Structure formats: structure tokens, C-alpha cells
Amino acid sequence: MTIFLTLCLSWAIASYLPILVAAWIARSFGVVVEQLTLGTGPVLMRRKPLVMRLLPINASVQFKHCGAIPAPGPHDRAGSLDARPVWVQLLIAASVPACLLEMAWALLGGEGLDLFRSAVAQCVRGALSPLSEAQSLLAAYHTALAQQSFGFVLGLTAAKMAAFNLLPTGFSAGYQCLEIVAQRAFPQVQRGLIALTLLMMGSWLVAVCVYLMPLLAHY
């Protein structure tokens, strides 16, 4: 299996499966799934609520909410996620990193849990040092893609994604759990968390571009 195919398949499975699990759990509690998006980029297929996109590197689910309605009635609250008890909302949000962590453990055992524990600090250190620390982390992941089995790469990817999902960055499970618990106080820190997310993503994007440039120069 080529490096590119291993990368695409591992990211697709690690992106799609947890979101599908979260959508299934939500529907089991009567929450309406308004849109389920698999992939990013140009739309390949749209069949409500499913949207399939070209690149298999992301997935998201949008649930019905009634919070933006000034005086929601019974019809508005029916099937709304924010009308469910807090523990149900937290369960649905936490199901994404939980699924990823379970994948890592199932594929790699205790090593998967060790990779998960180290990944939180790696996400932060790599963002703070895109030209040195992040380059070492990307090189290690590249080596795993080239030398390890698909099962190992999938477990590694799932462990890293699980850790990133627990960080309180925009649209992650950690962010959603903080929003559910904090509620009234959350808008005061929301902009800061979104700014932090953009900075981290921008830093890692720089790191990836710097790492890929010499590789692409050979083609």
C-alpha cells in the first residue's frame, strides 16, 4: 500500500467513523441530524442529510438546535440537541474522542493509550515551534506511513486525533463540552478560543508546507 493511499484511508476512517457514531447516538436519543458531511472540498453527492465531498480528510455533523429561537415552542424543541439534558449533550460530544481512543486501543493496545497521552503536549509544542518541533513530529509520522502496517498507522492517527479533539479549540469535542457546561459564561471566552484555534491551525499549516516542500521538489 502506497504512503498516499495509507494516509487517505487512515484519515478517512479516523474522520468518518467517530462522526457516524456521534450521529447514531444522537438519533438514538431523538435528536434530529440536519446535515452529515463526510470529506471536504467539492461536493460529490448530496442526499439529505448526507453530503459527500471529494477529499476524505474531515467530517462533521450538524444537529437541530432551538437556542437561537427567542421563544421556542414544543415543535421547535422536538428533536433539538440543546433541549436534551446536559448529560446527553455531553455524551454525544464526548463520543467522538471516545470512539477515536477506542480505535487506538483496539489496534495498538497500551501503546495506543501512550500515544494518546503524549499527543496533547505534541499538538501544543508543534504549534509553538512549527519549524523545529513540528518538523520532528511530521518526520516521525512520515516514517510510520512508510514503514509501519496500515493498522498501526490507523491506530496512531486515531490516538492523535483523539487528543486534538479534547483540546478546547474551535469545533472540537473539548470546545463543545466547555460550551455545554459553561453556557452563559462561554461567550466571554469564545472569541479567545476561536483565535487560539486559528493560530494553532495556521502554525501547523506552515509546518506541513515547510515539511512538504523538499519532498515535492523531487517530483
Image: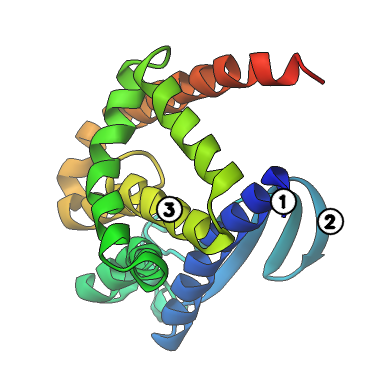
Cα gap from disc 2 to disc 3, whole angstroms: 29 Å
Per the image, label 2 sits on a secondary structure element best described as strand
Q: Earlier in the sequence, mark 3 or mark 1?
A: 1
Describe residue 28's horizontal placement relative to residue 39 as left or right. Answer: left
Q: How is the rendered protein coloured?
A: rainbow
Q: Which callout, 1 or 2, points to the residue nearer the camera?
A: 1
For badge 1, the amino acid type reads Leu
Residue behind mark 2: 44
Residue at disc 3, secondary structure: helix
Seen at 60% across and 43% down, the residue is 146
Spatial CA distance of label 3 from label 1 is 16 Å
Does the image show residue 3? yes
Pointer 1 and pointer 2: residues touching (CB < 8 Å)?
Answer: no
Q: Which mark is residue 156?
A: 3
Give the residue at x 54% y 57%: 15
> Marks 1/2: CA distance?
19 Å
Residue nearer the viewer, 145 or 80: 145
Residue 52: x and y, percent? 74, 60
Q: Which mark is residue 5?
A: 1
In the rendered image, which quarter contains the C terminus? top right
Q: Position of residue 203 (x, y in %)?
A: 44, 19
Question: Residue 145, which numbered label?
Answer: none
Q: Dot 1 lies on which element?
A: helix
In the displayed structure, would residue 205 be above or below residue 10? above
Q: Is residue 72 left or right of residue 217?
A: left
Give the residue type that dot 3 points to: Leu
Against 192, is 151 above or below? below
Count residues near mark 1 (Cα–Cα under 10 Å), then give few for <14, some for 14-19, many for 20+: few
Q: Amino acid at mark 2?
A: Leu
